[in-house]
Image (spheres, helix red, strand yellow):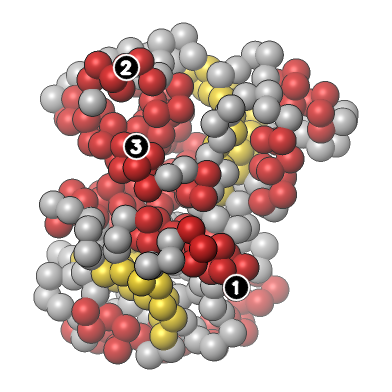
Amino acid sequence: MQHFLSLFDISSDDLKLILKIATVVKSKWQVGERPSILGNMVVALLFEKPSLRTRVSFESGMVQMGGSSLFLGQDVGWGKREAPSDFTNVLGQFIDAVVCRAKLHERVEELASFDAMPVINGLTDLCHPCQALADILTIQEIFGSYTGKHLVFVGDGNNVAQSLALGCAMLDMKFTLACPKGYEMDSNWLSRLAKVCPNASVETMHDADAAVATADVIYTDVWTSMGQEAEMLERRRAFADYQVNNPLIAAAPSSACVMHCLPAVRGEEISDEVMDGDRSAIIRQAGNRMHAQKGLLVWMLARDWISKNV
């Protein structure tokens, strides 16, 4: 059974195909075509964390492809009322796949371990693979190709950064993390990445201006993620020199675009001028969450359609 807990679960060719499917489906959507690719299929959204983009993009995407979705919050009692095996195996009797947004990555791993239905990681503390799909799709649209592009992530080496580093490595892109000392990516994640992609160009720098000097994409995220609120003041001090603002943008090539996975804390990790500026691809990037995830869902659930249409 195919799961999508991280980009490690797929090959580079799979990733390229998912992006190609997303492009085809989006092109149809742009001219008003919404083919019923997943007609009568149901995807459950099992969320421990609040969500705007992940929830609405999956729900809308399923409806537009002829299927439906169910939002499952804390009231279903996941991990509380009954054994994980009972919960998961019963859920698998009703649905075609589940998108899980969990506080801990181990939770989605446990869900997938029963092979009751395909499991998609909608965000965990370790990685955010659906976000990376949308980001790379956006880069492809802006530059015509993602191959050889340089993405510089300015900020915390968090779950989003880790997924992007792996996605870039799989597609022959360069990835640079510009962060304060002590906020690098997880060493185990990087070791695994190096084994899977031995020729990857993934680096960490502590000088943001130097890091963006050859950037095609300048990417940032919040300095304090959900669950890190107690560290907020400490993080604000540590990241004070890592705001994506006009002086930082001036140190990058004029062709570089700016991305952010949202939600943003305006005036903290990114200035209003950059967020709303001509070089911002942030809203387009957010919109591509739906299209990239459509590509993923079709790849997982409708292989016959792919052979005839992609």
* Amino acid carrying mark 2 in the image: Trp
Give the residue displayed 22% in from the left and 58% down from the top. 147
Let me know if residue 199 appears in the view: yes
Q: Give whichever of 180, 262 is nearer the camera.
A: 180
> For mark 1, what is the residue?
187
- Looking at the image, which residue sits at the far top? 40
Disc 3 crowd rating (10 Å Cα; few below 14, some 14-19, many 20+) is: many
Tell me what residue is drawn at x 50 percent, y 86 percent. Answer: 180
Identity of the residue drawn at 15% across and 78% down: 253
Callout 1 secondary element? helix
Label 1: few (<14), some or many (≥20) within 10 Å? Answer: few
Quarter assignment of residue 256 = bottom left
Report helix, strand or loop for mark 2: helix
Q: Which residue is mark 3?
A: 18
The residue carrying mark 2 is 305
Residue displayed at 17% across by 21% down: 32
Q: CA distance from mark 1 to mark 3?
A: 28 Å
For residue 264, say whether it is visible: no
The reply, left or right, for residue 218 in relation to residue 252 is: right
Q: Position of residue 201 (x, y in %)?
A: 36, 71
